Every structure is written in C-alpha cells, then in structure tokens.
Image (tube, coloured by chain):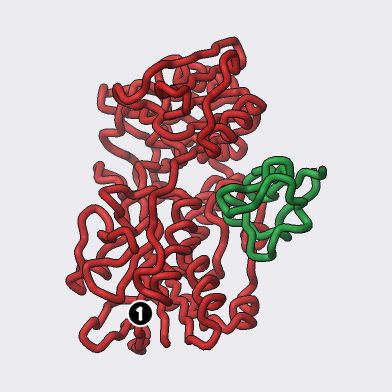
Chain colours: A green, B red
Amino acid sequence: MQKWECTVCGWIYDPAKGDPSQGIKPGTAFEDLPDTWVCPECGAPKDMFQPL
Amino acid sequence: MRYVVVGGGVAGVTAAQRLRALDPAASVVLVEAEAVPYYLRPGLIDVLAGAKGLGEITPYPREWFAKRGIDYRLGEAAIALDLPRKEVVLSSGKRLPFDRLLLATGAEPVRPSVPGAALPGVFTLRTAADAERIRTWAEGRRRAVVVGGGWLGLEAAYALRGLLERVVVVERGPWPLSRHLDREAGQILADILSEKGVEVLPRTEAAAIRGGAAVSEVLLEGGQILPADLVLFCLGIRPRTALAQDAGIGVNRGVVVNDFLETSVPGVYAAGDAAEWRTQIFGTVLAAREQAEVAAQNLVDPGSARYLGTRPTYKLKVAGIELFVFGASRPAGEFHSEERLQSQSCYAKLMLDKERKLVGAVLLGCPELASRVEELFQSGLPVPRGLV
C-alpha cells in the first residue's frame, strides 16, 4: 500500500501500521483516513502530505 | 454555551475544532496574540533555514476557522481573567464572556540572563516572527554561536549552518542532548554534527555576550572567546502562567491541572505546554493534542474524560542523522536488562523490563530498526530476542 510523507516534518504514514495515537487501525489506506486526522508529529492535516 | 480558548497554538486549535464538533450549537472563541494564523511550530526550523516560507507551514487560512463557526481573534492578547464575572479581558479593552474556559497559553523560551543578552543580534527562537528575524539578521553574516545543545539548539544550529560559514554550539552538559543520550550516543552525534560543520563545545557556558552596536563575541566560562555576529539562545521553554497566576488559579511550574485537565478553578481548564499534570510538562505536539482532546470533552461534559499521560517520543532529523528517543531514555534502575548494538553508522540501546517490554530506547542512524522499535513501544508487546 502507498506510503505518504508529511511535507512539514517528514513523518511517514505507513498504512500497514496505521496510527495508534489517533485510533487508526493497521491496514487503513491514507485516502480512508478521516479529514480530522493530522500528522502525529507536527499536526499537519492530510492535504500537507505527499505520496512517497 | 460559550467556550473561550486562550492561545492559538496546537493545543488551542485542536481544542477549538473539537469543541465545535462536540457542541455544534455553542459559541467557540479562539484568542491568539500573534498576528499570523496558526502555523506548525516544528516547521519553523525550515523557515529559519530558508527552505520554506511561513505559508508552507500554515495549514488553515483564516476563512477555514470562519467556515467552521470558530470566532478566531487573531492578534488580540488576553491580558487578564475576570473570574467572578467570567470574562476574558483583551488588549483592546474588550471583554469576552465565557461559561467554560481553556487556557492553552503555551510556553515561551527561557530568556538568557548573561550580560549582553540584550545586544542586537542575540535571539531566542519560538515564534514565526523570531524565525524570520533571525533569518534576516543572518544575511551577510558569517559566524553564529548557539547556546544550548538540546533538541532545538541542534536543529537550529544545523539550519544556521546552511546560512553561515561557522556555527558553534555551546553546551553545559558533557555531550549534546545529554538529558537523553548516554556517552556513546552523545559522542557519535557530536562526531556526525562535526562532519556536517556544526561543532559542539561541551561542559561550558556563555558567561557574557560582548559587542558594540551589535554582538561581536561570546565569552565562555573558561575564558575562551568565540567570535560571533549572531547568537541564539536555546535554553528550553517555560510555561506561560501569568494570566492564570494573576487570576489566582493554582500555578506551580505550569498551570496545575487534575486528570480532567481542570485547574483549581471549576470550569477553567488548561492544556498543552502551559499545563502541569502530575508534576509533568510534556512540551510535545502529541501531548498538546491529546490534552486538548480530553480538555475539550470535559469543557462540553465536565468529568467525562480523563487524561492518562502521553508516552514521550522525540525525533531529530538533521540531514542524514536520524535520532529517536522513546520513553525513558535514561531510566534510573527501573529496567531489567539492556541490549545494545553499535557500529560506525548506527547505535541502538533498548532498555527492557522483566517481560522484555520496552521501558525506553535510543536509536541513532538506524531508521529501519527505529521504526520496528516504535511499533513495539506503542503496542507494548515484548521485544523479540535478536532484534538488535
């Protein structure tokens, strides 16, 4: 599955891992993250990510 | 219901969004003293380095807040709390009535107390305006001294190295990041930084800043003199507590909150860098966001959510150096065993309890392994034998 990188802090969203800090289960595609989801490191919203 | 949030950093913005979602009919006012809209503070290093403009780290335009029905008072400072009347007094003289209040006033940099610290060319770094001022000052200048070899000091030093010929970091401790790293990791980090043109001088402090119309040199405790036409103090942060303290709200190092993130005054909550929970001030984006979520729930429905702490994680990425610190990096006698891996380019130390669960970890220069360790840290699963 496609990984996405935060353009502000470089944190990488890996769908295989999800984001436990925001209750995102492993296997969740980036496109399926809720609009309220933000980068756990710096708080950047989804539109500040780019495909890796 | 009227909610007022004082402070528009990550805690304030998160809470305002959350309040709006939880209570669509309520009035939500967000007060921020800075004149520019909310930006992502970790991105300021790139603004300092000139790699990004402020717009590129600004996630939401002003209209974004308006569309969500958040009354965004930008450039207006809260100067007092009138608790008997339940009002926030603004610098303009206006008063904002509230039913429940969140203090997300954040932190400010520790100001240097050494002689000469007020000279032109001496800075601290916290806000967008700071980053832009330092960057402007650096133009046409050659040598910088950064006082303080913590996370911010090292990142800022590396950013400045891209603008200036020589950057020296003065660090009181025995090696950079000495609060987090052991001697081996600290030495590896110092060597890598040195290769990248950032020299760390350990075990010393700035005794005075000297110059005429502007800074020209830094005198160190041992008598050594470092020429400098830019000095940046990165001595850590101090929670902004004056507003709370002046109103009689309980304050220690930060604004003291209970597990509901409520202060000593019912209906008044605190979150983020300003808040002190069980003696801890986290100072991370993740903790600020988690606290803001809990506080917002309690503003809407008092006593409905408890904050249980945020496990500390630190990451430093300066051109090729990937450093991760998870949990207690230097636990004192509270772990059972330690596993290490050390090579020329990688250093890893895992501290485990009796069940091989991670108490803490330090990883330098091994991002793949760090990613595995982070998963184990978050999941709380035992560390497989032979991982390092």
Residue B257 occupies quadrant: bottom left
Foreground of the two, B365 or B35:
B365
- Let me know if residue B142 appears in the view: no
The correct choice, above or below, for B198 with respect to B72 in the image is above
Q: Position of residue B52 (x, y in %)?
A: 66, 52
Q: Chain of mark 1?
A: B
Q: Is residue A10 above or below residue B4?
A: above
In the image, residue B261 lies at what x, y percent? 34, 63
Q: Position of residue B276 (x, y in %)?
A: 30, 55
The answer to whether residue A43 of the structure is visible from this angle is yes
Seen in the picture, residue B340 relative to B226 is either above or below; the reply is above
Q: Quadrant of the N terminus of chain B?
A: bottom left
Q: Residue at x 27, y 50 (%)?
A: B278
Looking at the picture, which amino acid does disc 1 mark? Arg
Residue bearing the label numbered 1: B100
* Element carrying mark 1: strand
In the rendered image, residue B222, in percent from the top left (x then y), is placed at: 26, 22
Looking at the image, the residue that sits furthest to the left is: B248
Quick one: B123 or B77, which is closer to the camera?
Answer: B77
Residue at 72% over, 42% down: A14
Above or below residue B288? Residue B115 is above
Labels in figure, total: 1
Q: Residue furthest front?
A: B355
**Left or right of residue B348, residue B125 in this image:** left
Q: Is residue B95 left or right of residue A50?
A: left
- Which quadrant holds the C terminus of chain B? top right
